[in-house]
């Protein structure tokens, strides 16, 4: 096995299978992207639990929800922006201080 192929296995998201082959043209489904985005948001202690909802259409993530601080919005956006298969992110979250 080449070192390039071995290194690829260590990258986040490298284990995803699309069911449509594993070539360079393989894409994640919207459901797979949504599941991973939701998982990442749930694990981020900077984002309050269940405060951000995720919708995905053709690889574009839309975030909805209410947050208390701008730093929470920043954390949520960072969590989902670089996910494999994401073509863009729309932020429809609102900051509502308590």
Image (cartoon, rainbow, N blue to C red):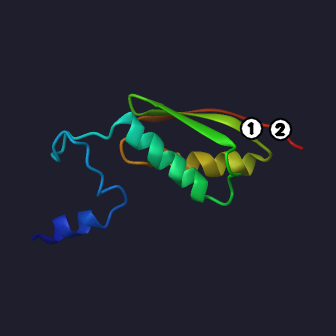
Relative placement, left or right, of 6 versus 70 is: left
How far from the left and from the top, in percent, is residue 43?
58, 59
Q: Position of residue 67 (x, y in %)?
A: 75, 43
**Viewer-proximal residue, 78 or 43?**
43
Work out which residue is located at the far right of the displayed protein and give it. Answer: 98
Callout 2: SS: loop
Name the residue that disc number 1 marks: 66
Disc 1: CA contacts within 10 A as few (<14), some (14-19) or many (>=20): some
Q: Secondary structure at mark 1?
A: strand
Label of residue 53 in the image:
none
| Quarter of the image where the N terminus is located | bottom left
When asked about the image quadrant of residue 19, the answer is top left
Looking at the image, the residue that sits furthest to the top is 57
Q: Position of residue 24 (x, y in %)?
A: 18, 44
For image coordinates 35% across by 55% down, the residue present is 13
Image vertical order of residue 27 relative to residue 75, above or below: above
Point out the residue furthest to the left here. 1
Query: Nearer the N terminus, badge 2 or badge 1?
Result: 1
* Residue behind mark 2: 96
Answer left or right for 77 relative to 20: right
Asked whether the beta carbons under mark 2 and mark 1 sit within 8 Å of each other, the answer is yes
Residue 55 appears in the picture as rendered: yes
Q: At 61% from the left edge and 58% from the top edge, which residue is drawn?
A: 44
Which residue: 46% across, 40% down? 34
Horizontally, is 91 left or right of 25 in the view? right
Please identify the quadrant where the C terminus is shown: top right
């Amino acid at each position: 096995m080449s070192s390039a192929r071995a290194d690829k296995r260590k990258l986040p998201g490298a284990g995803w299978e699309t069911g449509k082959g594993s070539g360079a043209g393989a894409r994640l489904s919207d459901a797979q992207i949504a599941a991973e985005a939701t998982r990442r948001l749930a694990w981020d202690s900077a984002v309050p639990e269940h405060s951000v909802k995720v919708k995905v259409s053709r690889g574009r993530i839309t975030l909805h929800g209410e947050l208390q601080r701008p730093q929470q919005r920043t954390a949520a956006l960072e969590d989902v922006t670089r996910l494999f298969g994401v073509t863009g992110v729309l932020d429809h979250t609102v900051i509502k201080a308590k």
